[in-house]
């Protein structure tokens, strides 16, 4: 593709050399992926600045450069200076791959909690209705029959557009994706055209990045500038605000008489949740295999999105009835009269939700094992400690993904919160030993909740990343008990 085709219509600030006839074979923002004929876009990131890798990109064959700030560029290599290279990367990536999102049914799900489960629910319902569905999210990316490891919840714009194009080649007609607040603030989904946007809720998380709730909400709300129609949880304060903002035509869902799609007659049991859903053309009796009120909201999110594509009530029932999502209230088989559950809960509200759900049907002690991630929002650590102390009978405070922080320092901040309660607890920094301790000391009717990492199969330390799967560790501990 000629470079003039890629940059046509873009509001660039300065052009050096004649760009008109340069042939572009690919686009990259990582110099290691540059090949001859590539357009190298310099992104000024939070940890890495692409401008520092211009020489490497040119040595690898970059045909032209896009920069955002003054930088030394090799003589004879054309460059263009723009005010925001992230926006340009999104725009030219979509153009380079032929605007693939326009050819797909594209559903975006945003919110603090429930994004992953909601996307899997949508995928299951739409597949039941006969669609070939791609999924992009936290656990993995599904492109036709391929499963690709997810590096982040929402890929960078270049990889995202390439993924859409690949999905079209694989015969995919519908894509459902988690849309993170980071991706919205950083323009990763800028050039995507969503048929439906879904807002699940907003609770404390990512304040290390957004600094305050208002910024966090405004980032989430950007999705609804890109949608044909939006669906929002009317029982959530920020969902109501979003509906009132009317960024696009909006419909509501909730456990509320004024919602467009609403749930009622909710029964929560250890094996799942049963409820009725009122929809515009009738009602549906449902049972999902994930216990908890949050499962009702996730189901409503999914149903409200799928109804835009004329799915039948039977498609909804079959799509949701047998669905299980990795690391979301996932039980591990035991050899005794106690329960082990692995859940991704890593924010105050999600930890509260899973513990309150379990408390609703528990006949014995609730034991929770959890820690908090390093290099992330520190303010939530004592809050989560207090929640555990108030709702669990016994807490094992341990390590999560400490990253560059010392695990003991993180644990001490969690401990500040649990000390405000009368909850009993122990500190075992080594996560494997913490899980083994809880299982070894389990008594009849205990429910052991291993929270924080869910589907993750790794643990990140300052100097290394190791294989670590809560479910595998729990199974091994059960076998050895």
Image (cartoon, rainbow, N blue to C red):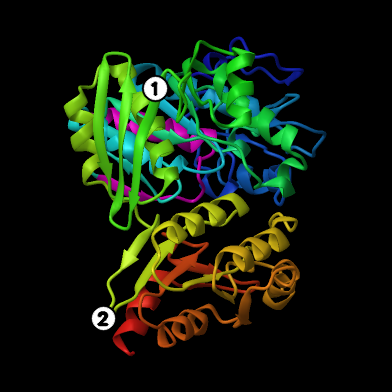
As measured in the structure, the alpha-carbon distance from the residue carrying label 2 to the one carrying label 1 is 42 Å
> x and y percent of residue 280 in the render?
32, 14
Q: In the picture shown, does residue 2 fall above or below 303?
A: above
In front: 314, or 46? 314
In front: 12, or 468? 468
Q: Residue at x 42, y 35 (%)?
A: 177
In front: 176, or 41? 176
**Residue under circle 2?**
335
> x and y percent of residue 117 in the render?
39, 44
Residue 150 sits inside the magenta stretch: yes
The magenta-colored residue range is: 146-171
Look at the image and tell me whether residue 402 can be seen.
Answer: yes
In-image side of 256 versus 62 (left or right): left
In-image side of 334 versus 400 (left or right): left
Q: Secondary structure at mark 1?
A: strand
> x and y percent of residue 266 in the render?
36, 40
Tag 1: Cα neighbours inside 10 Å, few (<14), some, or many (≥20)? many
Residue 311 location, quadrant:
top left
Residue 35 sits inside the magenta stretch: no
Q: Residue at x 62, y 15 (%)?
A: 244
**Residue under circle 1?**
261
């Amino acid at each position: 593709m000629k470079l003039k085709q890629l940059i046509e219509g873009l509001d660039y600030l300065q052009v050096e050399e004649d760009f008109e006839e340069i042939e572009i074979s690919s686009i990259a923002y990582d110099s290691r992926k540059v090949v001859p004929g590539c357009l190298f876009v310099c992104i000024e990131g939070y940890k890495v600045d692409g401008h520092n890798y211009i020489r490497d990109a040119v040595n690898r064959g970059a045909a032209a450069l896009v920069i955002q700030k003054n930088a030394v560029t090799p003589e004879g290599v054309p460059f263009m200076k723009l005010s925001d290279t992230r926006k340009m990367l999104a725009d030219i990536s979509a153009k380079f791959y032929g605007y693939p999102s326009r050819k797909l049914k594209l559903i975006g799900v945003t919110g603090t909690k429930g994004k992953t489960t909601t996307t899997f629910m949508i995928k299951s319902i739409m597949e039941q209705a006969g669609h070939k569905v791609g999924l992009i999210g936290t656990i993995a990316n599904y492109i036709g029959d391929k499963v690709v490891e997810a590096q982040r919840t929402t890929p960078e714009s270049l990889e995202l557009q390439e993924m859409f194009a690949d999905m079209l080649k694989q015969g995919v007609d519908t894509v459902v994706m988690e849309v993170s607040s980071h991706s919205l603030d950083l323009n990763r989904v800028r050039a995507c055209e969503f048929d439906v946007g879904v807002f699940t809720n907003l609770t404390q998380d990512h304040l290390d990045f957004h600094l305050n709730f208002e910024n966090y909400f405004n980032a989430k709300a950007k999705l609804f500038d890109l949608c044909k129609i939006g669906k929002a949880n009317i029982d959530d304060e920020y969902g109501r605000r979003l509906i009132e903002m009317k960024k696009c035509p909006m419909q509501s869902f909730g456990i509320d008489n004024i919602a467009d799609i609403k749930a009622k007659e909710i029964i929560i049991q250890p094996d799942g949740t049963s409820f009725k859903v009122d929809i515009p053309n009738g009602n549906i009796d449902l049972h999902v295999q994930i216990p908890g009120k949050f499962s009702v909201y996730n189901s409503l999110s999914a149903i409200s999105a799928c109804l835009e594509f004329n799915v039948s009530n039977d498609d909804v029932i079959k799509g949701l009835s047998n669905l299980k999502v990795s690391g979301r209230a996932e039980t591990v088989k035991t050899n005794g009269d106690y329960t082990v559950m692995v859940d991704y809960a890593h924010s105050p509200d999600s930890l509260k939700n899973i513990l309150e759900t379990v408390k609703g049907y528990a006949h014995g002690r609730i034991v929770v094992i959890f820690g908090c991630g390093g290099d992330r929002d520190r303010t939530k650590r004592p809050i989560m400690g207090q929640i555990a102390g108030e709702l669990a009978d016994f807490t094992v405070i341990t390590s999560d993904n400490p990253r560059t922080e010392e695990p003991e320092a993180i644990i001490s901040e969690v401990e500040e919160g649990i000390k405000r309660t009368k909850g009993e607890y122990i500190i075992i920094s080594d996560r494997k030993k913490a899980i083994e301790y809880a299982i070894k000391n389990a008594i009849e009717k205990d429910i052991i909740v291993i929270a924080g990492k869910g589907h993750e199969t790794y643990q990140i330390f300052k100097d290394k990343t190791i294989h670590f799967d809560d479910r595998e560790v729990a199974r091994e501990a059960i076998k050895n008990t």
